[in-house]
């Protein structure tokens, strides 16, 4: 299954339970000045996925904003790191 097939199954009709099967990490820079720049393509993509899944990426965890979702029957953790791109290894 390709990543595109995986996201075609994006639906959040179940409550996330069990271990996390996948991490979906949207890279970007925090702050309004980066909101619609090329540096935030990952954040914008993750926001689109979250909207489609009817979840809000707003739980602070792992120095990031996170949300649990279900895609294709798998528990998925959506992650928006809150460090700048040049510090994304933190």
Image (spheres, grey):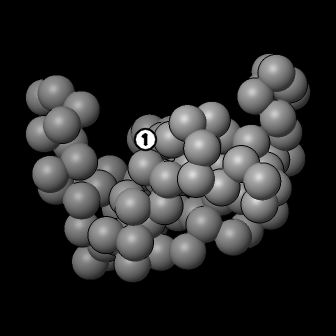
Residue 62 visible in the picture = no
Residue 69: quarter of image: bottom left
On-image quarter of the C terminus: top right
Image coordinates for residue 2, horizontal then vertical, percent: 16, 27
Rate crowding at label 1 as few (under 14), some (14 to 19) or many (20 or more) other CA atoms within 10 Å: few
The one nearer the camera, 30 or 22, is 30
Residue 45, compared with residue 13, is above or below; it is: above
Identified at 34% across, 70% down, the residue is 53
On-image quarter of the N terminus: top left
Identified at 71% across, 48% down, the residue is 34
Residue 25: quarter of image: top right
Residue at which label 1 appears: 21
Task: Count numbered badges in the picture.
Answer: 1
Residue 29, compared with residue 2, is above or below; it is: below
Residue 89 visible in the picture = yes
The one nearer the camera, 61 or 17, is 61
The one nearer the camera, 47 or 60, is 47
Image coordinates for residue 48, horizontal then vertical, percent: 39, 61
Left or right: 55 in relation to 80: left
Identified at 55% across, 36% down, the residue is 38
Image coordinates for residue 3, horizontal then vertical, percent: 24, 32
The one nearer the camera, 22 or 17, is 22
Residue 81, compared with residue 90, is above or below; it is: below
Name the secondary structure under disc 1: loop
């Amino acid at each position: 299954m390709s990543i595109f097939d995986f996201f075609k199954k994006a639906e959040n009709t179940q409550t996330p339970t069990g271990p996390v099967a996948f991490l979906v990490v949207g890279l970007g820079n925090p702050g309004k000045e980066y909101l619609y720049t090329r540096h935030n393509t990952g954040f914008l993509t993750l926001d689109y996925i979250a909207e489609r899944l009817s979840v809000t990426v707003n739980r602070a965890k792992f120095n990031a904003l996170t949300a649990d979702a279900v895609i294709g029957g798998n528990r998925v953790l959506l992650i928006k790191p809150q460090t700048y791109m040049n510090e994304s290894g933190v």
